[in-house]
Amino acid sequence: MTGKHAEEQLEKLARYVTDHLGLEFTGSRLTDLSRGAAAAGRENGFSDLHEFIDYVLGATPSPLLLQNLASHLTVGETYFFREKMVFELLEGELLPGMLESAQKRKVPLRIWSAACCTGEEAYSLAIVVHRLLRSRPGCKVQITGTDINPHFLEKAVTGIYSQWSFRATPAHLKDKYFHELKNGMWEVDLKIRSMVDFELVNLANLTSPGTKSKLSAKADLIICRNVLMYFSPLQAEKTLQNLQDRLALEGYLILGPNEGSSAAAADFSTSIHKGARIYRKNGVVPTPKSFRQITAPGDATLPSAPLAPAEVQRRAVLPESVVLPDLPQKPGLKTETLASRVTGLMEESRRLADEGNLEQALAQCDEVLKLDRLNSTAFYFRAIILQEKNEPGEARASLQRAIYLDPNFVLAHFALGNLARTMAKPKEAQKHFDNALTLAEKLPLDQILAESEGLAVSRLIEMIRILKLNFSD
């Protein structure tokens, strides 16, 4: 087989995988596809990769074949209480009200951990629910974890994990809900394991589940974090709509903080806080008040967001290509008064955005820019609001202004990359992701990025590398 034909064959397999599994393999990721397909081929008795690809492309896409491919093309990397603030939000704000409502209606609360990998997220949810049920005896909860990779689910059902899975787990939770085995592994306590069921589900092709499936009834809470970034933009939109269809009225859908912004349906309210994007069906996403921490007294508290880097440079003159909004400059104020006024307006804008009042939140941002036309943070937050309003062109212009005023604004570069990706501009997305990665790699890995709602530099670098691989030309 010639090199050109082999390349064309691999590209056909990539399209097949995208169509049937949702996974995107382009550019440098074709090497990963070739490696994974070769392993799948060997498992099926094919010594030659190209013979196996011919077989796959000519065969009916059966569930067994797709599961086999998925087991070699998906990479499991997760741990208990990943993005701890999301679990604090669930325990402190969302789940108590959901449990109360379910108990009053005398129905079970249904929770779905979609693309749960090896089960750590589903069991983390069960631990949080178990803690809350102490004050609600008799309340019933169904937790279902799903994944397309059968090998991941085998490990999830077993419930045995290495020390590496506990790198974000508070010690008191580990001691209470896990048992150490002789080989240094840890087993999930039976009372937690009994709360979770696992099923094989392909998110890229969600068909109606059978009556025996725990997913036959609509879920009150669906968590599908940092999954859609592996899909093509078109498949991500389709999958998000399918997840929304599976959600009960007033139910919650939680995605990663940079996922799904362009697909919010009219009957969904949305909010971004505490490291997640939260949708609610025919209901309002509550504004966080005081969280019940999952940490015990004496545990280290989460670090607060640092101030912007000292090397921030603000420029008084903008090039003609960067046009500021037509906002009249307000009369000058004393420096102290101006700073206080700007801070107050920004806090109010964030509060309004969290409540879903995007028009007023945008108006508050514009008030900030009337007082301080060189406020890069206001331009950045203005862009986030505009994205929620499905105004990508205006959002893009606002992010460009933020970066011109502050060339070191990592999250603005990252947001531009995500925006270009959703607008099907892969070369532009790659450029912005490169810029964000270069800046992020100069920062301490454990630093929490300003304006990120608790996102650490290390996590941002991980996300950028995934996106760069999945959305390159």
Image: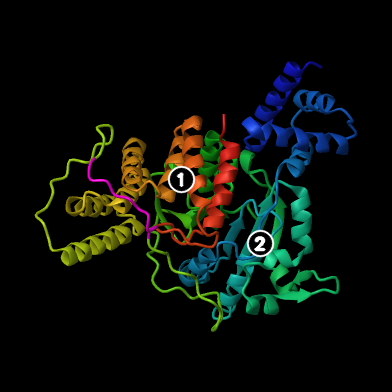
- Residue 16 to residue 469: above or below: above
Displayed quadrant of residue 471: top right
What secondary structure prevails in the magenta region? loop
Foreground pick, 380 / 159: 380
Foreground pick, 355 / 198: 355
Picture coordinates of residue 465, whole percent (x, y): 58, 44
**Res 466 visible:** yes
* Magenta stretch holds residue 213: no
Front: mark 2 or 1 = 1
Measuring 51% from the left and 66% from the top, which residue is drawn there? Answer: 85
Foreground pick, 429 / 116: 429
- Residue to which mark 2 is pinned: 79
Q: Which residues are magenta?
A: 308-317
Picture coordinates of residue 472, whole percent (x, y): 57, 33
Foreground pick, 209 / 467: 467
- Label 2 crowd (10 A; few <14 / some 14-19 / many >=20): many
Q: CA distance from mark 2 to mark 1?
A: 25 Å
Q: Looking at this rendering, what residue extends furthest in the bottom direction?
A: 297
**Res 194 visible:** no
* Magenta stretch holds residue 313: yes
Measuring 58% from the left and 50% from the top, which residue is drawn there? Answer: 462
Quarter containing the N terminus: top right
